[in-house]
């Protein structure tokens, strides 16, 4: 399955969930605090991270808090 | 000195601190502590770039309110998406709305800003928009339902102070939501001036983060905002071209000259 | 924030308060308390006019240092006599030396001021001269042995702030005695600006005494002087015409636009 | 004895001392704190107030603290 | 001093005069003559109010170019209709576009202004928009095809001069169409400052019309705009805190002192 | 615009040009011609250093009045001797009196200046003293019999403009001799501002001599001084925080919105 | 025929032309220079003033030059 | 004869006049316009240049116009 994660093309195992993706991308951010995920510009609530499986061709943004502004 | 009423809550500090530009997390933590700020802004960035959890960790410990911003967005579309992400990430409806028009001035784009504000207010956000010091734009933002207006004093990071105090005064006069001076403060007196003009608060980052001694400058800003607010409430003396003696003339001894 | 070293002593407060212009003695007492000032100025007048002992009573209780002035003197001769009287009345060698040239501006007369300063230094006084913001005059006063120089920011009681920050900066650069900004402060930010320019202290009266709420304004001045001094020590950011982002650009999400 | 006290002509008893003058002029200022006296532009120290007698034709200034500056 | 290239034509004068606010038509005529302006603005009003033909008569005789404005319009809709009327009335495609947001500041409404500009450019007008001193708004107007941008220096009729020279400088830096400073000029030096900042021209009315002596003030403005432009072209000396002698020190006689 | 009455003579130009700092004699000649100045200052230096006669030759041809200065003198003694030498060299009783106190600020020494002025007036000189912007010092100089007072706007050669317009205004208010703003002008608007404050003339050198294009800057200064004087005479409009429409509101069409 | 001229209700003769209206409203503006007319927010060009007849219920604006701006 | 001319020690022929000195020091300044001479801080008028002879030990300043101020 090919998806775009934060603008980068990635080959991921089928049926991977958002929760699993985040665990892989940002190990230290496990509890999801300060992290948000969007699939094709739709925010995925924390409560749906486990249940939501990625699908081929999707565009995913995984954002985390940083200093700013 | 009364509290700041903002977004339906009362805040003891009228200083909102940005968290960008510090040389280290430790410097940021100490400076924010010295500033007394209760609200601090944070950004969202892709995880590769964002420091792993540390900002959240640093800031959360101290019971501060994290106010996400939409820094870096050039369109209403991007700002709205970023705000929605922030709502999920920080579990808050509050957002400091930035929609910039230009990477040299970092001034807001008026049309995109209004569009984004309208959408976000409609989605239930408490919208705190960073805006130019344009009284008409400020009024439009208030009409749309923003919880405050946050006019700039000068370009972000420029340290130029309040370039146009007249506009700020007009905005304050006409606003019925809080006015927060956002951007431009370079040193303590700039923050005091903003408060003396009647602003309800000041948002700043670079002036502290990039000072030679950020912690000391944070303490300076805390004192300056208190000073400016007190002076505003105390009612200053009028300005005059000529002098007015503070020591009475009557009873002056007459020495033989 | 270090102490003010002045006249061979250390002072915790960098604010010197004049006692003239208040609506009541009680207002004066409360405002001085709120200001945190340790040094307060007093004048000498013929007994018919001077309130019977009350000023001394009011001020002495609070363990403040009474600094007599020579307000109202137009010649070196009169100022010297008044200073000698003050030395006897207040049992102090300190004197705030005022020799004015004009009752409309209350600006000092340079020649008479220098003459008086020379005589009083020769008689062992600790001379704190109120002077124009003239770097040459300031230097001459220092050369004569004055314990500080006290340039005006604007005419006494005018509330115009620091009309010529450039001159003040030059005076600070060249002085090796403390520089106290005396006269002109109208509101808190003016005092902060004086301190940011590097002044060692601020002397003011009307801005507090004649404010709508003197006690609140006194608190504002206390905070402003602290703010300005801290900012001076903290090292402010440079001024720039254009913006500099406080939130990094890297990692900004790319939404489809 | 005629003297000038604070610019005003006054008829005073002969041999009156400075201390007596001050006590009369400014009853509340008895201890001399915040008060100074000059005779013909010469300051009279507090310590000399009792011993110093006024003389005819002198010009006397009696000054006291007041709010100022 | 080169000509002003504006709207595809060359103009010998860089001063555009408004015609409102004069005490009499005669005063207007004489002041415009003294100003040397080639372009003068006019408004459209309902015939009962408009003086019967006299303005046109007065102005047309002197071979001046009449530039209609849309003063008094609060929406893009009204401004577009007024511009179309003006095109017919004055047989010109040129329009000074005003879409105001507020009758107290008379500042432009950014959104309505952009909408009107877009429509009018599309209809072939030479659009000269009165705008806030907002660099982003100025850029958007230029991108839409406006023939110039006309940022205000201060509110119309306020006489406050160039309140924010920094914004004006940024607008000049980035613009590739002429920049005309419109509104705010109170006296001659204000106009000179606008030109020294790099503006291509100045539009003013009240400063002349309401001066004690309008004809003399018109002459002052003419000279000031020439002075400011020449100074801009001549390249001024840098600003320095300290002095630099204009008379060399070498060869100073050494008298015995 | 009336003539300048100075030293018992009428002058058509209100601009006095210094001759120092030019890159070449030719540049000086052309710039002075473009400036329209009738009075030009010259210095005296030891013959080894002074260019052999050329300055005199250049300037004399054009029927200009040569006003010698005492530049470089630090004491009354030196200034008086230099003035006497100048009287012989230039066959004139006029002298621009400079007695400086410091080579970094080039500010005048008040005491020495007053001493020199008194002596020279006593010897029949027409004394034009360069002075600080100190109203008391200006008054003393006038009382001594000086033919004008010439307060500085900012340090010589600094190009900082009129740093303290308030002092200049007070000096103008009280003076009954001409007030010439001497030193500090950096660009055309600075000269216009000096004239608008009510000065009778402006003396400048570096702003022209060291501009990128001295001849063009000289023309700019000529126009600016004319502009500023005309504006002063014309009576400017008052400053207001809010707007005042120049186009009447009555008769505005009501389009259906 | 009732029309609204510059916001004011007016009773005018039927079939009156724009040219006739202007001549009546603004006698001194006969040549039309500096004058413009709109009917129901549509500009009527000078060239059509003679041929254009007003109709009942129309909203007419007759504007003329004045000092401004 | 030793004198100090513009701060510099000089050996000059006896009985040299001011006019002769100036002619030597500043040939182009012959007519004396824009030039002034002082001996021991006393100005020597142009009219006295011929008649005034220098004397041993004198301190002479010869100044000429230059650009300034």
Image (cartoon, coloured by chain):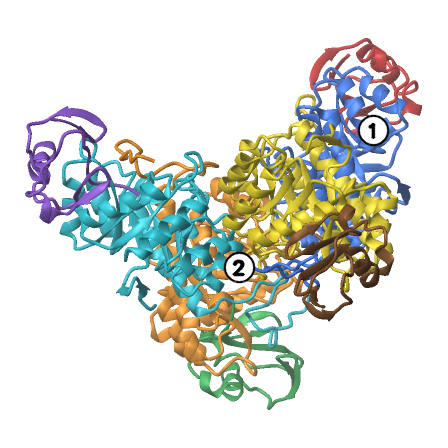
Chain colours: A purple, B cyan, C orange, D green, E yellow, F blue, G brown, H red
Q: Secondary structure at mark 1?
A: strand
Looking at this view, is F184 or H19 the one in front? F184
Residue E117, quarter of the rendered image: top right
Residue at the (32%, 56%) spot, across then down: B122
Q: Label 2 is found on which chain of the structure? A: C
Query: Visible in this render: residue E195?
Result: yes
Q: Which residue is the extreme one toward the front?
A: G15
Residue C17, quarter of the rendered image: bottom left
Q: Which residue is labeled 1 in the image?
A: H43
Above or below: residue D5 compared with residue G55: below
Above or below: residue B203 compared with residue F47: below
Looking at this view, is E32 or C41 the one in front? E32
Numbered label tally: 2
Please state the horizontal and vertical placement of residue E256, each as a whole percent of the image. Answer: 69, 30
Please state the horizontal and vertical placement of residue B201, each as a whole percent of the image. Answer: 36, 58
Looking at this view, is F185 or D3 the one in front? F185
Please state the horizontal and vertical placement of residue B102, each as a whole percent of the image. Answer: 43, 36
Foreground mark, 1 or 2, reads 2
Q: Are discs 1 and 2 both within one chain?
A: no
Q: Secondary structure at mark 2?
A: loop
Q: Which residue is labeled 2 in the image?
A: C183
Looking at this view, is B232 or G24 the one in front? G24
Side of B4 where E176 appears, left or right: right
Q: Quadrant of the C terminus of chain F?
A: bottom right
Residue at the (58%, 73%) spot, across then down: B248
Please state the horizontal and vertical placement of residue F21, each as a whole percent of the image. Answer: 69, 24
């Amino acid at each position: 399955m090919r998806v775009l994660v934060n603008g980068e093309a990635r080959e991921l195992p089928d049926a991977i969930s958002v929760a699993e993706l985040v665990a892989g991308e940002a190990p230290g951010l496990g509890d999801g605090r300060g992290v948000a995920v969007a699939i094709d510009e739709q925010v995925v609530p924390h409560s749906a991270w486990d249940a939501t499986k990625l699908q081929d061709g999707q565009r995913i943004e995984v954002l985390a808090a940083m200093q700013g502004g | 000195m009364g509290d700041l009423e903002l977004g339906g809550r009362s805040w003891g500090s009228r200083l909102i601190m940005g968290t960008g530009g510090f040389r280290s997390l430790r410097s940021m933590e100490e400076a924010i502590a010295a500033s007394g700020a209760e609200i601090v802004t944070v950004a969202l960035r892709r995880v590769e770039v964002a420091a792993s959890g540390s900002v959240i960790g640093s800031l959360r410990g101290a019971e501060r309110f994290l106010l996400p911003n939409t820094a870096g967005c050039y369109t209403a579309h991007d700002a709205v998406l970023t705000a929605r992400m922030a709502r999920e990430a920080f579990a808050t409806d509050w957002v400091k709305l930035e929609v910039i028009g230009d990477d040299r001035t970092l001034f807001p784009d008026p049309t995109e800003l209004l569009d984004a504000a309208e959408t976000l207010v409609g989605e239930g956000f408490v919208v705190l928009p960073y805006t130019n010091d344009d009284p008409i734009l400020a009024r439009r933002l208030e009409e749309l339902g923003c919880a405050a207006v946050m006019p700039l004093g000068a370009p972000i990071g420029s340290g130029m102070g309040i370039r146009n105090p007249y506009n700020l005064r007009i905005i304050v006069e006409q606003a019925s939501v809080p006015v927060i001076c956002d951007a431009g403060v370079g040193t303590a007196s700039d923050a005091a001036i903003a408060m003396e003009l009647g602003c309800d608060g000041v948002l700043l980052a670079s002036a502290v983060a990039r000072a030679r001694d950020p912690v000391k400058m944070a303490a300076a800003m805390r004192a300056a905002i208190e000073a400016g607010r007190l002076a505003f409430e105390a009612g200053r003396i009028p300005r005059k071209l000529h002098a007015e003696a503070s020591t009475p003339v009557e009873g002056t001894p007459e020495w033989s000259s």
